[in-house]
Image (cartoon, grey):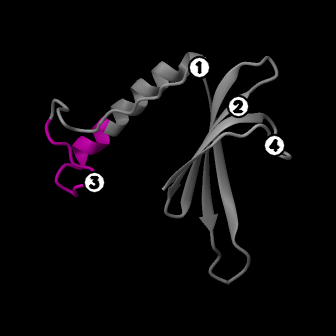
Amino acid sequence: MEDSIRKAHVEGGDKEILYSKAIKAGKRIYYLDVKKNLKDDLFLAVTESKKIQPKDGTQVSFEKHKIFLYKEDFDKFMDGLNDVIHYIKRCNEGKGPDVQLENEEGDNASDEIKLDIEF
């Protein structure tokens, strides 16, 4: 399930969030937030939030990890991400329908991620 939200401001947030997309994946939620820095430059903040439920029954907590991507790095990042995803899919061929490529050339295979952000 995916959610997209436009936010003007997040209470207590460190930067203004202009646009946000949440990607729910089991015990993890990935947040893709477009933020603006003090110089009015836009950047992408990627946050992984993982639900931690202790075995002793104490209160549930969330572990968070963040990375920040700046527009001058988008192309290099996407090239690297596409490369490693393609590698993982090739290594996992035959291990399940969710990771299998249809052929080596990539025809009819969803082995590329596209990120279209206009500034």
Rendered view: 59 above or below 35:
below
**Decide: marks 4, 2 in contact (CB < 8 A)?**
no
Q: Based on the picture, tell me whether residue 94 belongs to the magenta stretch.
A: yes
- Residue at numbered disc 1: 71
Mark 4, other Cα within 10 Å: few <14 / some 14–19 / many ≥20: few
| Rendered residue at 63%/41% (across/down) | 20
User: Looking at the picture, how far across and down is residue 6, in whole percent?
Assistant: 67, 39
Rendered view: 94 above or below 38:
below
Tag 4: residue type? Gly
Q: Secondary structure at mark 3?
A: loop
Q: Nearest to the eye among marks 2 and 1: give it.
A: 2
| Rendered residue at 55%/58% (across/down) | 28
Label ID, residue 35: 2
User: Looking at the picture, how far across and down is residue 34, in whole percent?
Assistant: 65, 32
Tag 1: residue type? Lys
Residue numbers of the magenta segment: 86-103
Mark 2, other Cα within 10 Å: few <14 / some 14–19 / many ≥20: many
Tag 2: residue type? Lys
Label ID, residue 13: 4
| Cα–Cα gap, marks 4 and 2 | 11 Å
The quarter in which the C terminus is drawn is top right
